Amino acid sequence: MKPPYSVNNKILGLISSIAEKVGEVRSARLTKPPTELRKRNRIKTIQSSLEIEGNTLTVEQITDLINNKRILAPKKDILEVKNAIKVYSILDKLDPYRLDSLCHAHRVLMDGLLDNAGNLRKTSVGIVKGDDVTHIAPSGDMVYPLMNNLFYYLQNYNDLLLIKSCVFHYEFEFIHPFPDGNGRMGRLWQTMILKDYSPVFEFLPVETLIKERQQDYYNALAKSDNQGNSTSFIEFMLEIVNQALEDLLSTQNLTLTNVERIEVFRKIIDADYFSRQDYLRHNKDISPATASRDLKSAVEQGILRKTGDKRLTKYKFIR
């Protein structure tokens, strides 16, 4: 059975905006950002998704863990981060359309934190916040057929992938298929589905924006629970995705180092000769002086070959 939701004008407008921004990202060759930017965004993603679940580690501490440095923090928090680092490092080996792949990801994510990690629950659970029970999940004997149905929808229905990713995220949280780790898994799996829509989503820190609007996130889940469909949650998540893309496009040149700007431009210009003006035309948010410093540094490092002088100066990437 297809999960219930409706497409309204707000959703259509957000889908149009997201598609336009993904096109801009593709034109700017940012679908796979430079190495350092990918690393920074991955750390922000891990930190934000785990902080939502109560983890105390900072961006700096997670950076130290990735760099194999010792830190002082609760053992459970450190293990959660180490597991998250492992699962995000194998995204390319996971299949977003297979239940066994999702279970494998949960096994890696919750290793040492949960007995029988990677196995669907067979008991009943309720979600408690403070003194209130906010959600009674379907009974344990319904989990496997509900998850099979959800993956059937993902594999076989012709809905837009942007919508499917949001529907899956909501339905996953509603089913609550594991005893623990469902929040971080739902967010991770939406990233997996979005990655199939565009590679840019593998390194886009959507979870950071969810953390900034954490109460809105919970409210959207609760509103969809009350309405009996995922429409409100789809609206919320598409707003988050749209904002994440907007942030990427508005800060791309401001956040890149000179080395990263050169690396991105190499993919655009390929083997052609180019001028400083060509470089500036792509990097519109830097000054001519900064462009000159970028190019001079790349020449000194043996990345570029320089020919001509003054206005006749041309550059070419060295293979």
Image (cartoon, grey):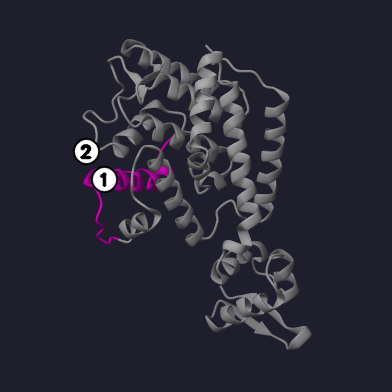
Is residue 10 inside the magenta stretch?
A: no
Determine whether, in the image, residue 294 is placed left or right of residue 48: right
Determine whether, in the image, residue 4 is placed left or right of residue 57: right
Q: Which residues are magenta?
A: 68-95
Residue that sits furthest to the front in the current view: 131
Read off the residue under disc 2: 112
Q: Quadrant of residue 241?
A: top right
Q: Toward the viewer: 181 or 91?
A: 181
Badge 2 marks a residue whose secondary structure is loop
Q: Quadrant of residue 65?
A: bottom left
Q: Is residue 172 visible?
A: yes
The image shows residue 92, relative to residue 95, as above or below, that is below
| Prevalent SS, magenta region | helix
Q: Toward the viewer: 277 or 238?
A: 238
Q: Toward the viewer: 264 or 114?
A: 114
Read off the residue under disc 1: 79
The image shows residue 72, relative to residue 5, as above or below, that is below
Badge 1 marks a residue whose secondary structure is helix
At horizontal 61% and vertical 23% (from top left) the residue drawn is: 158
Q: Are the residues tagged 1 and 2 within 8 Å (C-beta)?
A: yes
Q: Horizontal and vertical percent for residue 261? A: 60, 67
Crowd class of label 1 (few under 14; some 14 to 19; many from 20; radius 10 Å): some
Q: Earlier in the sequence, mark 1 or mark 2?
A: 1
At horizontal 36% and vertical 43% (from top left) the residue drawn is: 87
At horizontal 32% and vertical 38% (from top left) the residue drawn is: 109
Q: Horizontal and vertical percent for residue 242? A: 63, 40
Q: Quadrant of the C terminus?
A: bottom right
Q: Toward the viewer: 196 or 165?
A: 165
Q: Horizontal and vertical percent for residue 252? A: 61, 58
At horizontal 24% and vertical 32% (from top left) the residue drawn is: 114
